[in-house]
Amino acid sequence: MKLKRTLYFKFLLAYAAFALLCLILISTLTSSWTLSLLTKDRADSLYREASLISRSYATLVYEDRAELSAARSQLKAIDTYISAEVWLLNSSGKVLFNSRQSEDTPPADVYSDFDPTDSGSYYMTGDFYGAFNEEMLSVFSPITSHFRSIGYVIIHMPMSVVIEARNNILLVIYNTFGIFMLFSLLILLVFTLIVYLPLNRIIRAAEEYAAGNMDYRLKVHGQDEMGYLAGTLSYMASEISRSEDNQKKFITNVSHDFRSPLTSIRGYLEAMIDGTIPPENHEKYLVIVKNETERLTSLTNGILELNSLNSRGLILDYSDFDINSCIKQTAETFGGICTKKKISIELILMGDTLFVHADMGKIQQVLYNLLDNAIKFSHSSSIIKVETTEKNERVFVSVRDFGIGIPGDSINLIFDRFYKTDLSRGKDKRGTGLGLSIVKEIINAHKQNINVISTEGVGSEFIFTLSKSAAEEE
């Protein structure tokens, strides 16, 4: 469970880191940029006022007391309107007017160090050469006469006003960010519901499956990738469970099919050794022992062949051959047993020749296994029909018997290894249960299909396809 906790913790850590980074950016870069923009904007506004004053009251710099007295009230009104001190300086830096001082105490301050080029702009921030005890925004506009500067209008505003405006904007930003982060918690909730919790269930299921509990049910639904992953894991578990069941059946069947002939062989040999079977009967029972060893050999060869088919992917030796001729040759090999059981094989073949493209040896094995199977489960004095047809560039081969048939609940299992229906166990004394498995593997290797149609008590029909030979088409 460590993996899922780490993933969820990383997501929460990333979420917290994102929030912290945003706060740091707002409190540093955003704060600095906002203050700079507000300072510039306020400086522009004050500069327009200073320019207006410089144009309207230029003659005051000549210390014309009458006009200065008349304009004082107007300048003080401007001070009140813009909430900023208005100064008039002559070219020597002497303060001629200060809107915050009374008429009784005319200003006597001189700022000879004042140089408007110090700031590189039309405003500066600071204490204005020690004139104030707090940081001020000082904006200046020159007073010109006859194309030369004879003084300056300077407007001072506390930077605290600009900072307060900045703080108000930041407060709005912080509040908006807080609301945004609250809403973004929905993302965490969605992540928890559609990713974390399903992933948690998937990990739990994987642990159960790893512990061997293939019956554990994974309850994750959906059409997204998480649902697909859960479905794939469930399918994998079911396939593993089925594989384990098949393995158990495989071991059970192998044990049973090996035990029976070995028990017979041992019993007969012990009986001959201890004299229970007299010497004149030894030949009879040695023939039985020989038959049982042949059965063991057949069973062993079938297992080895199936393992070979699976391990090497069944390398096929393709060639063009006449399937009709192949069927005739295979059917002839069963002449003796068919005569003994009074069974006839009827061949219904399309045309004189019908060429297919396949591995001739493997297809002969398929035909042999299907005919052998049909003969085993056919009644005496019955018919087995083998038919070939052609459709859509494919050749269909049918092997049909009229024997005991296959129960409906066994149709989907007959191609499993060692599988035998209950009806077949009484008749298939010498069968290994591997014949149809080998047939299925060979047909699948040819990328063709094999199907079975069967009715219990009526008979069975196996139909497989082969690719028609291109040479015959030409």
Image (spheres, rainbow, N blue to C red):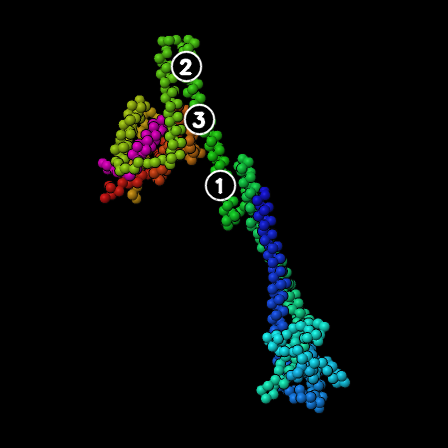
> Which image quadrant for residue 70?
bottom right
**Residue at the disc numbered 3:** 254
The N terminus - image quarter: top right
Residue density around tag 3, few if under 14, some if 14–19, many if 20 or more, within 10 Å: some
Give the x, y percent position of residue 213: 55, 36
Per the model, the C-alpha gap separating discs 3 and 1 is 28 Å
In the foreground, 84 or 214: 84
At 50% across and 44% down in the image, what residue appears?
231
Chain-order first, disc 1 or disc 2: 1
As helix, strand or loop, the secondary structure at mark 2 comes to helix
Residue density around tag 1, few if under 14, some if 14–19, many if 20 or more, within 10 Å: few
**Residue at the disc numbered 1:** 235
The C terminus - image quarter: top left
**Residue at the disc numbered 2:** 268
As helix, strand or loop, the secondary structure at mark 3 comes to helix
With respect to residue 229, does 431 lie above or below? above
Residue pushed farthest bottom? 66
Per the model, the C-alpha gap separating discs 1 and 2 is 49 Å
At 31% across and 29% down in the image, what residue appears?
383
Residue density around tag 2, few if under 14, some if 14–19, many if 20 or more, within 10 Å: some
Q: Are marks 2 and 3 in contact (CB under 8 Å)?
A: no
Q: Which residues are magenta?
A: 350-378
Question: Is residue 131 inside the magenta stretch?
Answer: no
Q: Amino acid at mark 1?
A: Tyr
> Which image quadrant for residue 280?
top left
Chain-order first, disc 2 or disc 3: 3
At 55% across and 43% down in the image, what residue appears?
203
Give the x, y percent position of residue 382: 32, 27
Q: Is residue 302 visible?
A: yes
Question: Is residue 352 inside the magenta stretch?
Answer: yes
